[in-house]
Image (cartoon, rainbow, N blue to C red):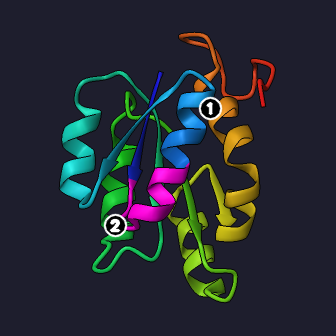
Amino acid sequence: MTAILLSADLLFSSRLEHAAARLGFRLLVAGTAERARELARGGEAGLLIVDLTLPGLPLERLLADWTADPSAPPVVAYGPHVATGTLEAARRAGCIEVLTRGQFDREMGQVLARYLSSPPGGSPGSAASSD
């Protein structure tokens, strides 16, 4: 199963890519919302992860378009703990889970397993975490 990361942070994306590989998942990195949509069109993505610090991120428009498509994977977002307004905006916009960057850094394996380990047609979290 594949996750898409929408981020320009190469260091953090590398850490997440290694965490995904250890669990047997694949991570594709997109630097723009348009690229994330292109990557999701293949249908194999089980999760979109959004870095809320991405410059110029059209969060509300991205999530409105994303959630309008019933086949689109769920969206998890993360951002700085001090950006409470941005974190709350992500919740209101439709992210299934919103974490601070520190939480996501500590729990990235569990988050990936929670959403990518579900059998096809299963609900997120229905499979046991392998982390």
Residue at 64 percent of width and 20 percent of height? 117
Residue at 68 percent of width and 30 percent of height? 113
Q: Amino acid at mark 2?
A: Ala
Closest to the observer, 1 or 69: 1
Q: Secondary structure at mark 2?
A: loop
**Principal SS element in the magenta part?**
helix
Judge left or right: residue 131 versus residue 14.
right
Q: How far across and down, in percent of the image, does residue 59 sit?
A: 38, 68
Q: How far across and down, in percent of the image, does residue 62 sit?
A: 32, 59
Task: Say which residue label 1 marks.
Answer: 115
The quarter in which the C terminus is drawn is top right
Q: How far across and down, in percent of the image, does residue 90 sit?
A: 54, 68
Q: Amino acid at mark 1?
A: Tyr
Q: Is residue 74 above or below residue 43?
A: below
Judge left or right: residue 127 versus residue 93.
right
What is the crowding at mark 1: few (fewer than 14 residues within 10 Å), some, or many (at least 20)? many
Which quarter of the figure has residue 28? top left
Task: Say which residue label 2 marks.
Answer: 8
Magenta residues, start to end: 6-15
Closest to the observer, 123 or 38: 38
Q: Is residue 5 magenta?
A: no
Q: In the displayed image of the protein, which residue is found farthest to the top?
A: 120
Of the image marks 1 and 2, the number of the one nearer the N terminus: 2
Q: CA distance from mark 1 to mark 2?
A: 22 Å
